Amino acid sequence: MIRSLDDLNPTARAAAQKYLDAVAADLDAEFREPVLCDLRAHLNDHLAADATEADVQALIDEAGPVVTGQAETSASETFKHRLTNGFRLTDADARVASTWWNPTDDRLFLPRALGWGWDLNFGALAVRLGLIEPDAESVPFSSTPDSAFKLAAAVPVALAGATVLHYAVRGRSLPSSLPANWDVAGAPNRWTSKRQAMATDLATTVLPAAVATWAAYSGRPRPNRAGAIAASTAVASVGAFVTLWRSLGGGRHPWAGPSMLGVLTGSIGGLLLGLAKAGRAAEIERDVHHT
Amino acid sequence: MRTEHEAWASQLRKGVLELAVLGLLAGEPKYGSQLVDDLATHPELSISAGTVYPLLARLAKAGLVTSVWQESPVGPPRKYYTLTEPGRRTLNAMTQAFRAVSATVTTILEGQR
């Protein structure tokens, strides 16, 4: 037993101090002082003045790692994760799938897959509506057949086709300026040239359709494919709806904003539910009808 | 705001949840909502469906349980979970560890009286 680490020889004291410094670096400020105080007392109680560096190391090994009992993620870590999670570029499509469709998580809103905020968890909504079981697939979309992805990609392709057809057929008869923005009452408050409106609408429907088609025929993991097609459908739905809204010209259309929201959620939710149901059916076919 | 005791009790329940689910599957295969109902009969564990299903997915991923759809005589097909051999070994090891910890803590607490 020693009164303080100063009673040790220099090498043993250095080893003990190095251990305490390493522990201090890993501890939250809240716990640092009391834990270090207890550890110093532990070392003092168990070391003799003639203890060697090896004796100190043996005592440290016997003590094992210092655990503060913080099994749960701290609030600051959770906040930091939520702040940065939506901006990670890796696996963005898989993140979309696991956020927009997470039937085993009963929360209706989850931290956004892309950007800040919250996304609707269509999986939890479908479970609450009794449309599917929470564990219908072991991993969502992992059993969804390739044909279902190809069929799902047809949704943004159809929206892009409708937009192209709209401008091909009605393009000449549309006025030279079209609405570019609307107020809460659904009345245009900013206008743009027909050419610019057409370029924007074609870009926001044709590009997502191309991405969805590529995803459907790619060999990427199935959850990634589902995420890419769902995100593409979301963008294409908004693009197609805006095209329609522009063609209405001036005047108030208070139903348009809520309708767009309905089309957006309906298209994403319907598409993800369809893919999940196809996966469920494939699992049942595998387990029930092939055994 | 949760008290220190409530936070500790929550941690304790989380710690034994995996053991409880594996234990319930030891006797016979069960489907998801059956497991949730069985766990609901033990209110002291206060386990909800939102906790059980992610856990089942994690156990399946770890190879401790396997799932298979089966026809139901009273409705749509159900997905049944079964312990795998590694799952059974894990359950045995966890049971031994839990009993040892439980017995030690009980001895300590009884020594205080």
Image (cartoon, coloured by chain):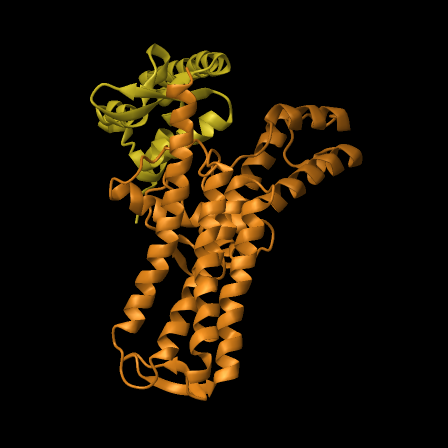
Residue A31 placed where, x, y %? Answer: 50, 45
In this view, the residue farthest toward the right is: A11
> Which residue is situated farthest in the bottom direction here?
A176
Work out whether residue B10 or residue A256 is closer to the camera in this orientation and state it. A256
The total of numbered circles placed on residues is 0
Judge by depth and name the residue closer to the eye, A13 or A98.
A98
Task: Please state which of residues A286 and B65 is positioned toward the viewer in this rendering.
Answer: A286
Please report the residue visible at 50 percent of the width from the left and 28 percent of the height from the top: B61
Q: Horizontal and vertical percent for residue B111?
A: 34, 16
User: Considering only vertical position in the picture, is A200 above or below A64?
Assistant: below
| Residue A64 falls left or right of residue A48 | left
Residue B103 x %, y %: 38, 14
Measuring 44% from the left and 58% from the top, which residue is drawn there? A158
Question: Which percent across, then down, holds residue A78?
Answer: 47, 51
Decide if residue A30 is in sight here.
no
In this view of the protein, which residue sits in the foreground, A41 or A141? A141
Rendered-image quadrant of the C terminus of chain A: top left
Residue at position x 37%, y 20% from top?
Answer: A288
Q: Quadrant of the N terminus of chain A?
A: top right
Q: Is residue A39 visible?
A: yes
Look at the image and give the colour of chain B: yellow
Q: Going 36% across and 75% down the picture, which residue do you hit? A: A245
Q: What tint does the image give chain A?
A: orange
Residue A285 to residue A128: above or below? above
Q: Quadrant of residue A180?
A: bottom left
The part of the image, by quadrant, that contains residue A190 is bottom left
